[in-house]
Amino acid sequence: MSSIVVVGAGIFGVTAAWELARRGWDVTVLDPGSIPRAVAASTDVSKVIRADYGADALYTGMARAALAGWDRWNAEWPRPLYHQSGFLLLAREDMTPGQFEYESFQLLAREGQPVRRLMTEERASRFPAWPVARYPDGYFNERAGWAESANVVTHAAGLARAAGVAFHEGDGFSHLIERGQRVAGVSTSSGHDLRADIVLVAAGAWTPTLLPQLERVMWATGQPVVHVDAGSSERWRAPQFPVWAADISRTGWYGFPALADGALKIGHHGSGRRVHPDDPRVVLPEEIDRVRAFLEESLPDLAGAPVRSARLCLYCDTFDGDFLIDHDPDRPGLVVAAGDSGHGFKFAPILGALIADAVERRDQPWLPRFRWRSRGPDTREAARSNA
Ligand SMILES: Cc1cc2nc3c(=O)[nH]c(=O)nc-3n(C[C@H](O)[C@H](O)[C@H](O)COP(=O)(O)OP(=O)(O)OC[C@H]3O[C@@H](n4cnc5c(N)ncnc54)[C@H](O)[C@@H]3O)c2cc1C
């Protein structure tokens, strides 16, 4: 039986550990926190689950496979953690070729997905919170929604334990144990040596700090998340107020329906700010002001809503926005699964098998996109709104 130490118990690490245990590996998972760790990117009340990826057929295909997985988990698990509220994508101008909303709509429509372009009257009656004048175009995707991410990590970790995975909570990776060229295990912060055939580092935004050879390829980016109090009105809940994106490719704004307790989450998928993953997680006053300004323009009836909470969550950004899931070509025995770039959680139901296939060097059609790569003068660079 082959053995593996998995560094990091976020959604990448936990789903990989679970799948590898099911494939007969002897699996140990390390994490300095308790699972799910409060500061982990995977630990939140909600994440968007969508297949709307512009003209990118690979991610669209992966997301559609993941959606089938969310249905399966909803059927198998004690209660559904994926909520198919639908996804409303609004555009500040008419949707045109080359634009994210237009290309997403075209690709999903071609694939027979339940997407519907919204004419003004229909939009005004179905989604009344959004001023038509500000968002003259857009579409609604029924086959999308949100998942209770922290609860998903908790439940998946429970299933991984049941499959034989050993979790070392409260103890983290300190450094690699190397024997000659080969990685032979890890030393932990509490001074234990864990030897294994393979070490899988899935430490999210901490990955380039633990493995400095990756600093040019990936880094930690702070992204503020704000919850306002929307009260108990159905106006702020699905179906009238589903998961939404407000001209996201140009503005970065997206968000969720209010939860049962009235908390309504607003996120910004923008350039964010570079941070060290262990820096204090502070949301700056100007970041709150920016949310206020957005609400005044786009959701005026929420502009005065009190801020319930704010959190700085971290992306592990890669230079091109693609994940990195592969063996380190210079260090046999070391595999990395990181670089989520702010869009990895939706793939949870297929992530474990994808990462396990990479560990086992299996041919898998999506993996070449996530191969080990370096940054050069001609490499594609990811661009996000910095509005
Ligand atoms: C603001 C925000 C909004 C997002 N919204 C969405 C969304 O709507 N939809 C979507 O699909 N994705 C979204 N994402 C992305 C998604 O959250 C990530 O892709 C995913 O959670 C990354 O999982 P991970 O396991 O790589 O990292 P994490 O969940 O961060 O887990 C990394 C783990 O590594 C551990 N670790 C750190 N140091 C060590 C060490 N020394 N030893 C051992 N373990 C260590 C940490 O404790 C942590 O538990 C969002 C991310 C952010 C930040």
Image: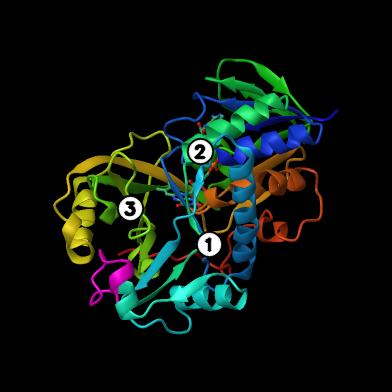
Q: Determine if the C-beta at disc 2 is less than 8 A from ligand 1.
A: yes
Residue at 52% across, 27% down: 35
Residue at 56% across, 15% down: 190
State the residue in front, 234 or 349: 234
Seen as rendered, the residue at the extreme left is 304
Label 1 sits on residue: 143
In magenta stretch: residue 132: yes
Q: Amino acid at mark 2?
A: Trp
Residue 5 relative to residue 207: left or right: right
Q: Amino acid at mark 1?
A: Arg
- Check residue 206 in the rendering and tell me which mark sits there, or answer none: 2
Mark nearest the camera among 1 and 2 is 1
Q: Which quarter of the picture shows residue 194?
A: top right
Seen as rendered, the residue at the extreme right is 1
Labels in figure, total: 3
Q: Earlier in the sequence, mark 2 or mark 3?
A: 2
Q: Position of residue 380 (x, y in %)?
A: 55, 68
Q: Position of residue 146 (x, y in %)?
A: 46, 51
Mark nearest the camera among 2 and 3 is 3
Residue 114, above or below 86: below
Q: Tell me which segment is drawn in magenta.
A: 124-135
Q: Amino acid at mark 3?
A: Arg
- Check residue 237 in the rendering and tell me which mark sits there, or answer none: 3
In magenta stretch: residue 134: yes
- Check residue 183 in the rendering and tell me which mark sits there, or answer none: none
Kindly report the distance in space between the C-alpha atoms of the residues bearing marks 1 and 2: 33 Å
Specify the principal SS of the magenta part.
loop
Residue 282 relative to residue 195: left or right: left
Residue at 63% across, 47% down: 349
